[in-house]
Structures are given as C-alpha cells and as structure tokens.
C-alpha cells in the first residue's frame, strides 16, 4: 500500500468516526482531496485508492493536471480565489467552484461555461467569522448574492463554503462552523435549495462534521506536508 493510499484509509476511518460521534451517516459527508502543489502522479495514486474528487487552488497548475488526467473519471473542484481574468479556464475545465464571492465572477463563469458541458456547480464563499485575511462575502450579504447567482443560466448554485480563522479548540471551532450552518439553513428557508456546506479541513474536520458540514477539504492528511 502506498503512503497516499494508507493516509486515505486512515482519513476515511477518522471521518467515519466523526460522523458516528455526530450521529450522522458517513455517506452524507463527501471527502475532497486537496491536491494543490502535488503532481498528477499523486492524484493517480489517490484515484487508485478510490478517491475521485480533487480540489485545486492554483488555476494554471490545476488545468495542467486536469488535461493530463482527462482520461479518468475525476471530479475537479476550484477552491482557490478567482480573479476576473482567470474565470475562463475555470469555466472551461472545472466541475465545481467553491469560491464565488462576487456577482461579477459568477456572471463571467456563467458566460464562459462551454455549452457542451454540464452547468458549473458553485458555492458562495462566506467570510463567516470576519477574518481579515479571508475572502468571502459578508454573512449579511450572502442571501442576496445567492439569489443573484441562482438565476444565472450556466451555473447551478449548490451551497456555501467557508474557511474560518484557526480556532484554539474543538468547542471554538464548532461555534464558528455553527454560524455557517445557521446561514446555510436560513438561505434554504428563504427558498433556495442548497445541499452543500463545504467546511472543514485536516485540522478541524471533526468540528465541521459535528456542525453539519457535507464536504470536507483535506490535503496534508492525505498527501503529506507541502
């Protein structure tokens, strides 16, 4: 068994335990393997170990991997910030985007999504704790942006994503993630059929799962330190 395969096995056990402790079904939480800075060979190893969904932060690096591995049934998620001049390669190559935080970006993604591809699945990134270094729309503005994104023709709004500042312990992490879950529930109650709450990484996935995450983004616990 390779290092990556072993890490995936351990991580899946950890994720299953987190779901059990939270009273949730393991199949309700998707594992996204964050492969940024690792080459196509690492993605191949993870795929051989049963992983099909991969997250990338750096667009040009990701496009090279996506192109090289186009023969495999992989799902690619853009989880990094998107500048206006980089929307076209994102629209043309990715399946998901987690980091929509401005209407302009969403509009460009919709306009540039090729007609032969399925609609681009998108999440609104929310700066849930007001972190000064974090991207994302303010929580009070998330519903308005979600309504605008939901009507764009080549996008399908799926949910919310957040990357809070590191918290000192499990309880503090849960408190921050609970704010994202409350916002997610409020937007659903307003009539938008969200089904994805993308939150939690290697260090805090237990708190995220306990708070209602449906997708955790894990890199170092799978691929090792960068």
Image (tube, helix red, strand yellow):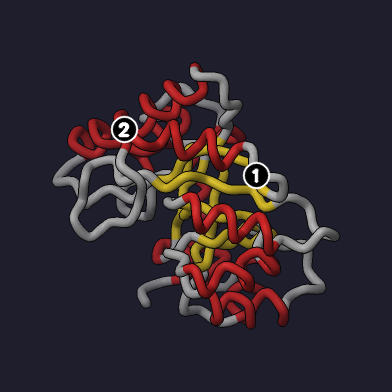
* Residue appearing at x 56%, y 42% in the figure: 149
Image quarter where the C terminus lies is bottom left
Q: Are marks 1 and 2 in contact (CB under 8 Å)?
A: no
User: Which residue occupies the foreground of this view, 181 or 28?
Assistant: 181
- How many numbered marks appear? 2
**Residue 210's image quarter?**
top left
Label 2 Cα neighbours within 10 Å, binned few <14 / some 14-19 / many ≥20: few
Q: In terms of sequence position, does the residue under pointer 1 or pointer 2 come before the other? A: 2
Residue at 14% from the left image edge and 46% from the top image edge: 168
Which residue extends farthest top? Answer: 189
Where residue 123 appears, x then y in whole percent? 52, 45
Between marks 1 and 2, how big is the CA–CA gap?
Answer: 21 Å
Circle 1: is it few (<14), some (14-19), or many (20+) Cα within 10 Å? Answer: some
Residue 90: percent from left, percent from top = 61, 67
Residue drawn at point x = 40 percent, y = 36 percent: 142
Q: What residue is disc 2 on?
A: 140
Q: Position of residue 69 (x, y in %)?
A: 73, 76
Residue at the image position 28 percent from the left and 56 percent from the top = 134
Towards the viewer: 128 or 144: 144
Q: Is residue 14 visible?
A: no
- The N terminus, quarter of image: bottom right
Q: Secondary structure at mark 1?
A: loop
Where residue 48 sits, quadrant-wise, is bottom right
Locate residue 186, reporting x and y percent.
42, 21
Q: Residue furthest left?
A: 168
Residue marked by disc 1: 152
């Amino acid at each position: 068994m390779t290092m990556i395969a072993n890490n995936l096995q351990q991580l899946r056990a950890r994720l299953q335990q987190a779901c059990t402790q939270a009273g949730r079904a393991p199949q309700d939480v998707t594992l996204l393997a964050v492969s940024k800075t690792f080459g196509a060979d690492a993605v191949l190893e993870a795929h051989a170990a049963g992983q099909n969904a991969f997250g990338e932060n750096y667009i040009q690096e990701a496009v090279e991997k996506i192109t090289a591995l186009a023969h495999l049934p992989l799902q690619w998620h853009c989880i990094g910030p998107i500048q206006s001049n980089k929307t076209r390669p994102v629209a043309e190559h990715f399946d998901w985007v987690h980091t929509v935080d401005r209407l302009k970006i969403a509009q460009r993604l919709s306009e540039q999504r090729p007609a032969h591809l399925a609609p681009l699945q998108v999440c609104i990134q929310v700066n849930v704790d007001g972190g000064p270094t974090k991207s994302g729309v303010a929580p009070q503005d998330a519903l308005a942006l979600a309504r605008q994104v939901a009507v764009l023709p080549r996008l399908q709004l799926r949910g919310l994503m957040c990357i809070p500042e590191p918290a000192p312990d499990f309880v503090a992490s849960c408190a921050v993630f609970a704010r994202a879950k409350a916002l997610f529930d409020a937007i659903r109650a307003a009539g938008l059929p969200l089904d994805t709450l993308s939150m939690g990484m290697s260090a805090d996935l237990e708190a995220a799962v306990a708070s209602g995450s449906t997708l955790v983004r894990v890199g170092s616990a799978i691929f090792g330190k960068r």
